[in-house]
Amino acid sequence: MTKDQLIANIRRKQSFLCVGLDTDLRKIPQHLLEEDDPIFAFNRAIIDATAPFCIAYKPNLAFYECYGLKGWQAFEKTVRYIRDHYPDQFIIADAKRGDIGNTSAMYARSFFEELDIDAVTVAPYMGEDSVTPFLQYPGKWVILLALTSNKGSHDFQITADQQGERLFEKVLRKSQQWVSEEQMMYVVGATQGQLFEDIRKIVPHHFLLVPGVGAQGGSLEEVCRYGMTADCGLIVNSSRGIIFADSTEQFAEVAAAKAHELQQQMASLLTLDPRP
Amino acid sequence: MTKDQLIANIRRKQSFLCVGLDTDLRKIPQHLLEEDDPIFAFNRAIIDATAPFCIAYKPNLAFYECYGLKGWQAFEKTVRYIRDHYPDQFIIADAKRGDIGNTSAMYARSFFEELDIDAVTVAPYMGEDSVTPFLQYPGKWVILLALTSNKGSHDFQITADQQGERLFEKVLRKSQQWVSEEQMMYVVGATQGQLFEDIRKIVPHHFLLVPGVGAQGGSLEEVCRYGMTADCGLIVNSSRGIIFADSTEQFAEVAAAKAHELQQQMASLLTLDPRP
């Protein structure tokens, strides 16, 4: 998906919501456990219920891999279901990969050729040649970890070098030399507040993928105040706050209501006119 | 596996060789493509041929995930085959994972509960709470990326902070506070030469997992000169130089010869007496 298509979807739906499919078998409604593929059954219901209110889905690979073969099958079915039924949705494989060149190339092939995924999250620690193999596919995106939402983000990411440049700033600055803003986004946690201002000084036009609204305590208003651009420039993810809001047979309706609520907040904060 | 058991294996076999199972369907002998599961057929032959000469196997997840379900199945079968037939081998899932706490916990469950793997490689960028979930399993190890073997390792890993401490040094120093050397190793690329000396100043006793000997150009002698401890303290990985040394029907014999050759070099460099 191109940046223009993504912006058009945000404008039309008045939403920059990404629904995180962190599907944990221990948290899904009991009655689904009788299904052949409970993970996929849950995801399908969540997707059908929330699709009108979001522009992206982000399955987190960990939640699939931990069930081995069956988990991987559920992941593939989920991706194909979104692609077949909701072709406008931007699909993010939250995988946080990053390895030496030939290995990253294998991961890229897995996500972009075998499955028609739009974007993969990548960790920057190993540097340029661990990231660039993902950039060989036009219209496919790398979403690079910059400043994450967790407590441990402060262990290494905000360390300043001898010129005063912090590690996340160095990641933003250097990685811009590898590819244009048409194929690169950055992960910035909603919990990082005013650091969004510092980030926008370095990447004024890039899209940011923002986890951490909801269960992790980040504020949507604050993220928009400091991070929004003229083209929106934000994809805000919510996982647990939507998909596990209810654990009865009404879970999908409740998830839809939660997603709708967030979409309405987003519409009120969004400066992109729905009728351009 | 405990550190003592690992050292005992190294002593007994006079080897600190890890065989990297980076099994690429495009590189394996043609005749194996007729098998039901060519990846597993290749791995089994390589394992049976090389097991006398190595103390560890390291399947790189990327090479399995890129084949989706079938790849994942081959990975699981490979791990179970090693566990059943060569219980003394140390199994490393080269996954380079690292995510927020609840997600890392899912990965840990996948590798240490569902599969009886000994160690997982983890990326440090997200800090303490992305690593500690892997440390909840006694006898199981985290192998944290410190200074990798690739060119891009110099993009961020060697940046010094305002006290002159480089990022890889900060990773080594901070992570020692999270757990003892009984559950933590570090990835240090064989291509890093004399930087091993700086690393041993911070982690004098930890085991290091050293990729980059062979295809990537690192020198075994140099690694041992600067990195070896009284307990060896090294697991040196070779992948392509062993497993793809030959692509005919004799591939397993040639792999065995390459592994044997490396084992003999290792025996001559090792200071652990085989008869303690």
Image: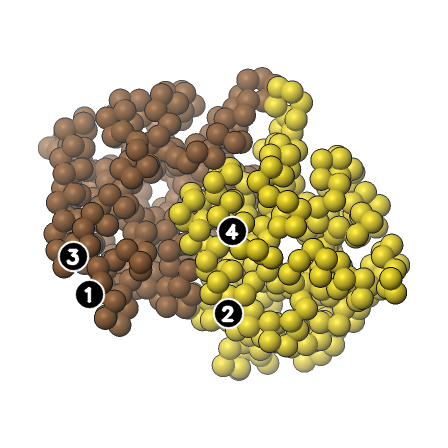
Chain colours: A brown, B yellow
Pointers 3 and 2 in contact (CB under 8 A)? no
Q: x%, y% of residue B265?
A: 85, 60
Q: CA distance from mark 3 to mark 2?
A: 34 Å
Q: x%, y% of residue B41?
A: 58, 77
Q: Chain of mark 3?
A: A
In the depicted view, which residue is nearer to us: A97 or A205? Answer: A97
Q: Chain of mark 2?
A: B
Pointers 1 and 2 in contact (CB under 8 A)? no
Task: Say the numbered circle drawn on residue B44.
Answer: none
- Same chain, labels 3 and 1: yes
Mark 1 is on which residue type? His
Residue where numbered disc 1 is placed = A31
Q: Residue A217 sits in which quadrant?
A: top left
- Callout 4: helix, strand or loop? loop
Pointers 3 and 4 in contact (CB under 8 A)? no
Q: CA distance from mark 1 to mark 2?
A: 29 Å
Say if B65 sits above or below A56 in the image: below
Residue where numbered disc 4 is placed = B136
Badge 2 local density, few (<14 within 10 Å), some, or many (20+)? some
Q: Earlier in the sequence, mark 4 or mark 2?
A: 2
Badge 3 local density, few (<14 within 10 Å), some, or many (20+)? few
Q: Would residue A47 be found to the left or right of residue B186 on screen?
A: left
- Same chain, labels 3 and 2: no
Q: Residue A266 sits in which quadrant?
A: top left
Mark 3 is on which residue type? Thr
Residue where numbered disc 3 is placed = A248
Residue where numbered disc 2 is placed = B76
